[in-house]
Amino acid sequence: MAGRDVDYDRPTLLSCGRCDVRWTALTAAHCANCHETFAGVNTGFDAHRVDSQCVPPDQVGLRLDGGYWIGGGERSPGRILRASTRPGILRQGLVS
Ligand SMILES: [Zn+2]
Ligand SMILES: [Zn+2]
């Protein structure tokens, strides 16, 4: 067994692999089709899928907070990060 290098204080950085968005909320849902990120699977994500198609989140009553699309009563779980063009270097910025 190798030494444990995990820093438990650092949030897990999740990524799509096909766009430069990075996020930390484990409960968030990133759409692999339109590459928007939603605070919740059962709220924002489901709301933007109509007839198996993506619709612009602002057309289904969602709003952008910190880069996450949130529904009524939801709170943004944090902020979305965007990777710079150079791998391994992250720049903080709003998606909006
Ligand atoms: Zn979508
Ligand atoms: Zn993506």
Image (cartoon, rainbow, N blue to C red):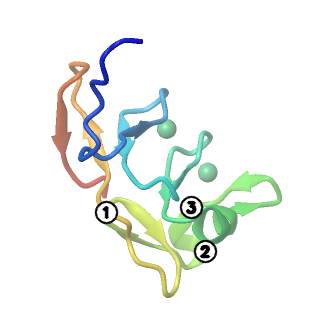
Tell me: is circle 1 under 8 Å from ligand 2: no
Using residue 16 as the reference point, say whether residue 10 is left or right of it: left
| Mark 1 vs mark 3: in front | 1
Q: Residues within 10 Å of mark 3 (few under 14, many from 20)?
A: some
Residue on which disc 1 sits: 78
25 lies above or below 3? below
Residue on which disc 2 sits: 60
Q: Are marks 1 and 2 in contact (CB under 8 Å)?
A: no
- The spot of residue 19 in percent (x, y) is 43, 32
- The spot of residue 47 in percent (x, y) is 67, 69
Callout 2 secondary element: helix
Using residue 48 as the reference point, say whether residue 40 is left or right of it: left
Type of amino acid under label 2: Val
Q: CA distance from mark 1 to mark 3?
A: 21 Å
Residue at 25% x, 44% y is: 10
Indicate which disc, 1 or 3, sits on the residue closer to the N terminus. 3
65 lies above or below 15? below
Q: What numbered label is drawn on residue 56?
A: 3
